[in-house]
Amino acid sequence: MALPARAPTSPDTPSPTWQIGVEVDLATALALSRATTRALLELSPLAHREITAALEHEIDVLERQSDPLSLAAANAVRQYLPEAA
């Protein structure tokens, strides 16, 4: 089943299939991201240091945007830092 690349333009015709597809894609991307981060942290001391620096940079960028969604994302990314430290 193919899903459209964007949400329906008419609010009168919401598409639950599209919303579910987006939620599944997001959950999949997040799971793959977590697994990749954990694998990189275990790879070597250099990889550990580099992924920690990258996470800190992403948190800084998100916090500078200072909108509620970015701040929530920064807090979510920050959860990786205790693992990385």
Image (cartoon, rainbow, N blue to C red):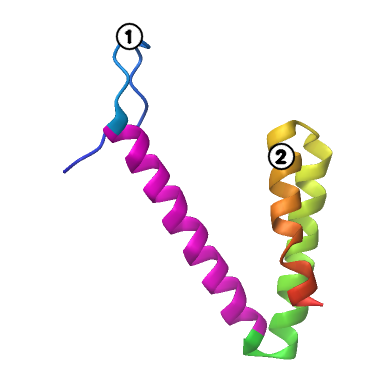
Residue 34 falls inside the magenta stretch: yes
**Numbered disc in front, either 2 or 1:** 1
Q: Which mark is residue 70?
A: 2
Q: Is residue 19 left or right of residue 35?
A: left
Q: Is residue 21 left or right of residue 64?
A: left
Q: Amino acid at mark 1?
A: Asp
Q: Is residue 68 left or right of residue 31?
A: right
Instruction: Determine the secondary structure under disc 2.
Output: helix
Q: Position of residue 76 (x, y in %)?
A: 69, 54
Q: Position of residue 61 (x, y in %)?
A: 78, 46
Q: Quadrant of the N terminus?
A: top left
Residue at 82% x, 77% y: name it. Answer: 85
Residue at 49% x, 63% y: name it. Answer: 31
Instruction: Determine the secondary structure under disc 1.
Output: loop
Of the numbered discs 2 and 1, the one sitting upstream in the chain is 1
Where 12 falls versus 48 (above or below)? above
Where 21 falls versus 6 (above or below)? below
Q: Position of residue 5 (x, y in %)?
A: 33, 34
Residue at 62% x, 88% y: name it. Answer: 43
Q: Amino acid at mark 2?
A: Ser
Residue where numbered disc 1 is placed: 12
Alpha-carbon neighbours of circle 2 within 10 Å: few (<14), some, or many (≥20)? some
Predominant secondary structure in magenta?
helix
The magenta segment is: 17-41
